[in-house]
């Protein structure tokens, strides 16, 4: 309605980009509307009278716009516009009750801050006087401004140079018994990109000087103060550096909002990528505090001195994916979790001590910042294996909306970070023996760099690259000192974690290899880790989008150590393979997808043939056509019984299957049972989108499998399902259903139980 009234009053051809309400008196409020024109934008000023329902006499000649039970709101009154901004006006902030010397005059002053995409902040002073005031206010003739507005090539400086003389104003607003003169107080220049938010600092008393907080897409947040009648930035927080042209996942897109805490000693900033940044005002102490105290003339200067000399210390920020998480993979020892998302990042999560006993999972690294939406990931590293014996630990392979698989190895800086986290957890448990056997192979690099407009993380950076200019020190010793923020600098086991800028720039893992072969975008991955000391290789299975042909629905097998394609599994599927799972012993590979067919690929006796790599040592031995009525979203082998597999489908059913070895017809896939989730969210059937068996069950309950299932509505349930031949007549039992308030609000894409390893006990999760 405001927009419609705005057009009907001024016949403006442009929409409103922002609006701001301000309560100015008991019977009136301001409405400011910022236009969204290509050039010469305006701040339109309205007043909206309102009266109590029982005070109809005050209504006068005003027309009732909205009638409420206790209030009557009158038609908005347009008083004109304020010209100056050259691009969309997107934010406002209002500060009233300014401390002014009125010399006995009935006078009130307020400031309106406005800004937007032109990166300039304008402060408009509103001076309200009683109608009986003898001082006459001359309004600047708007003909010049109207002429300027009609010109296409007018210099913006002409508008900014239209300064008001004493007794002049840009706009006059007439109220009942008073009038308000609006003039341009100041033009604040400091940001280089669009300003996204403005907010005034809450004053403790009326004598405190005004302080304005502004956030911008230039990755900075500025604090402005009036110092001897000159507005200037007194503090700057945020990240001024970074890889120019980096992707969204690099967190270099600036801030969309910023606010003060209630007591104004902290600043919170909302990053474009969803991260929450915090800064705390450091109290002055020692010599600085005494010098400041000596300069104070009275108590009113204390607050001003604190702001002018304030240091803002960055606290650990709250980070996470800001788009759908598509896949995840645990480290083989369960030390950390890797996740990939359509926000084009791969993130590393680890358990961090909070205080002396509490623990929390937080993001401590961002190994991959990509230019394509991420779709899949597989952790392929062995269990602390030497680099020449199997696949080294801390290696993963990722897939995205591209045809290439990428292999990453952890840098030394990440291993040092993980070691510090591990030592802190051991110390909190009273274990003083914090020796570590972390992989310190000489072939690992200290850190990785992401070239501008590049997709591959490099192990070194050229001097001409922006990463070496803006990403901090490149000397290994200096970098180790700056990045190793966990290096025993804790108070009560609380650590200074990497900042958001460090996560997006300095915690990258180097890309060591690319795997080519697929003809379309990658869909899913799964890995088989061969036992340490085994002669057989660790394998990675990958699938891509099928383009209406059987050939593109094939599954490729890769050697996880050298990255060679060792086999192509054909003839199993007719459309996209959306899910795959290796059995724990590597004997079977299960696959399914859009064609609703579950295929079981069995390892050929004798391992990988040296002469024929067409099948990679696996052959199709069993299949269940139309295993479900709709697409199969997830399959997973039981760790304790490698011939048991579960599947979840869009038809709303979970099925448990057994691979039966027969001598006559070969292996067959036998359905043992099927069931539906207990929570359907009011639907006839609730699509099952993820299934996962837990590992490490006691021997006395080996006849059961603990199965986690995730649904399209975001619910998660844990079931005990009979998996032995002797329990065929038993039904699955619901063990736990996550409450709706604690569940996801959208589709569960993947479930994965944390591997059981030393130190991963019940207390640590």
Image (cartoon, rainbow, N blue to C red):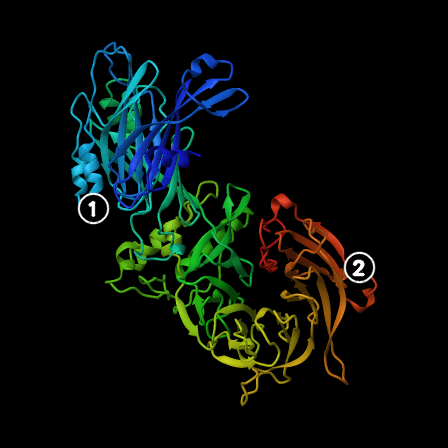
- The residue shown at (17%, 40%) is 157
User: Is residue 52 positioned above or below 449 on the image?
Assistant: above
Which mark sits nearer the N-terminus, 1 or 2? 1
Quarter holding residue 127:
top left
Figure quadrant of residue 634: bottom right
The CA distance from mark 1 to mark 2 is 77 Å
Mark 1 neighbour density, 10 Å: few (under 14) some (14–19) many (20 or more): few
- Asked if 487 appears above or below 546 in the picture, the reply is above
Q: Is residue 382 visible?
A: no
**Is residue 228 depicted above or below 391 in this figure?**
above
Q: Along the horizontal axis of the image, is 141 left or right of 660?
A: left
What is the number of callouts on the image?
2
Name the secondary structure under disc 2.
Answer: loop
Judge the density around disc 2: few (<14), some (14-19), many (≥20) Cα neighbours within 10 Å. Answer: few
Q: Nearer the viewer, residue 187 or 379?
A: 187
Q: Where does the image place residue 207, in percent across and percent down from the top left?
A: 30, 19
* Residue at screen point 39% across, 69% down: 443
Q: Nearer the viewer, mark 1 or mark 2?
A: 1
Instruction: Using the image as rendered, state which of residue 716 and residue 113 is in the foreground.
Output: 113
Q: Is residue 634 left or right of residue 523?
A: right
Tell me the residue that label 2 is attached to: 731
**Split into 4 quadrants, where in the image is the N terminus?**
top left
Q: Residue furthest bottom?
A: 611
Q: Give the residue at mark 1.
A: 152
Tell me if residue 27 can be seen: yes
Instruction: Give x and y (percent) for residue 83.
Output: 25, 35
């Amino acid at each position: 309605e405001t927009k419609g009234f705005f057009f009907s009053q001024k016949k403006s051809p442009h929409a409103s980009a922002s609006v701001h309400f301000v309560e100015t008196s008991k019977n009136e409020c301001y409405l400011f509307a910022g236009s969204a024109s290509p050039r010469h934008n305006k701040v339109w000023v309205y007043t909206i009278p309102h009266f109590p329902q029982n005070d109809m006499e005050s209504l006068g000649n005003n027309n009732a716009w909205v009638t409420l039970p206790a209030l009557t709101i009158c038609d908005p009154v347009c008083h004109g516009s304020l010209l100056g901004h050259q691009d969309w006006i997107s934010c406002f902030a209002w500060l009233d009750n300014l401390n002014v010397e009125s010399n006995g005059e009935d006078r009130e002053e307020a400031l309106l801050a406005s800004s937007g995409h032109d990166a300039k902040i304008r402060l408009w002073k509103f001076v309200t006087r009683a109608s009986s005031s003898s001082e006459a206010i001359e309004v600047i003739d708007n003909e010049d401004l109207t002429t300027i507005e009609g010109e296409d090539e007018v210099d913006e400086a002409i508008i900014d140079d239209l300064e008001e003389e004493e007794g002049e104003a840009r706009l006059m607003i007439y109220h009942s018994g008073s009038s308000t003169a609006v003039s341009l107080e100041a033009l604040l220049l400091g940001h280089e990109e669009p300003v996204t938010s403005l907010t005034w600092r809450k004053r403790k008393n009326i004598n405190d000087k005004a302080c304005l907080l502004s956030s911008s897409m230039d990755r900075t947040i500025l604090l402005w103060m009036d110092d001897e009648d000159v507005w200037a930035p007194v503090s700057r927080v945020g990240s001024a550096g970074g890889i120019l042209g980096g992707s969204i996942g690099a967190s270099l897109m600036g801030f969309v909002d910023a606010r003060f805490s209630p007591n104004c000693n902290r600043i919170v900033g909302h990053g474009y990528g969803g991260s929450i940044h915090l800064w705390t005002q450091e109290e002055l102490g020692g010599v600085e505090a005494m010098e400041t105290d000596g300069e104070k003339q009275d108590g009113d200067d204390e607050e001003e001195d604190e702001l002018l000399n304030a240091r803002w210390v960055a606290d650990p920020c709250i980070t996470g994916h800001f788009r759908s998480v598509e896949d995840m993979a645990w480290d083989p020892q369960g030390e950390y979790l890797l996740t990939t998302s359509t926000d084009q990042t791969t993130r590393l999560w680890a358990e961090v001590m909070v205080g002396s006993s509490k623990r929390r999972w937080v993001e401590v690294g961002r190994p991959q910042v990509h230019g394509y939406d991420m779709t899949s990931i597989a952790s392929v590293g062995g269990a602390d294996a030497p680099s020449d014996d199997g696949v080294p630990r801390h290696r993963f392979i990722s897939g995205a909306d591209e045809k290439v698989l990428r292999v990453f190895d952890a840098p030394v800086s990440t291993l040092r970070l993980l070691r510090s986290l591990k030592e802190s957890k051991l110390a909190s448990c009273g274990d003083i023996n914090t020796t570590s056997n972390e992989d310190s192979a000489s072939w690992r690099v200290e850190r990785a760099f992401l070239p501008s407009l590049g997709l591959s993380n490099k192990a070194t950076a050229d001097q001409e690259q922006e990463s070496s200019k803006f990403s901090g020190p490149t000397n290994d010793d200096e970098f180790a000192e700056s990045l190793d923020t966990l290096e025993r600098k804790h108070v009560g086991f609380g650590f200074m974690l990497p900042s958001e800028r460090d996560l997006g720039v300095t915690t990258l893992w180097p890309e060591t290899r690319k795997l080519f072969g697929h003809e379309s975008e990658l869909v899913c991955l799964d890995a088989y880790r061969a036992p340490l000391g085994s002669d057989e290789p660790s394998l990675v299975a990958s699938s891509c989008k099928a383009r209406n042909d059987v050939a593109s629905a094939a599954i490729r097998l890769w050697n996880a150590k050298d990255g060679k394609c060792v086999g192509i599994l054909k003839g199993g599927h007719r459309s996209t393979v959306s899910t795959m799972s290796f059995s724990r012993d590597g004997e079977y590979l299960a696959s399914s997808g859009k064609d609703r067919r579950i295929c079981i690929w069995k390892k050929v006796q004798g391992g990988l043939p040296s002469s024929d790599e067409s099948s990679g040592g696996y052959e199709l031995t069993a299949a269940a056509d139309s295993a479900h009525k709709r697409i199969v979203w997830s399959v997973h082998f039981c760790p304790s019984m490698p011939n048991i597999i579960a599947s979840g489908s869009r038809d709303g059913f979970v099925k448990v299957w057994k691979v039966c070895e027969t001598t006559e017809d070969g292996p067959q896939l036998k359905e043992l049972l099927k069931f539906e989730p207990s929570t359907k969210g009011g639907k006839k059937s609730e699509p099952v989108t993820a299934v996962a068996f837990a590992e490490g069950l006691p021997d006395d309950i080996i006849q059961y499998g603990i199965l986690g299932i995730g649904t399209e509505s975001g619910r998660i349930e844990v079931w005990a399902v009979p998996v032995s031949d002797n329990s065929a007549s038993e039904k699955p039992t619901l063990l736990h259903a996550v409450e709706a308030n604690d569940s996801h609000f959208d589709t569960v894409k993947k479930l994965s139980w944390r591997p059981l390893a030393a130190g991963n006990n019940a207390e640590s999760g």
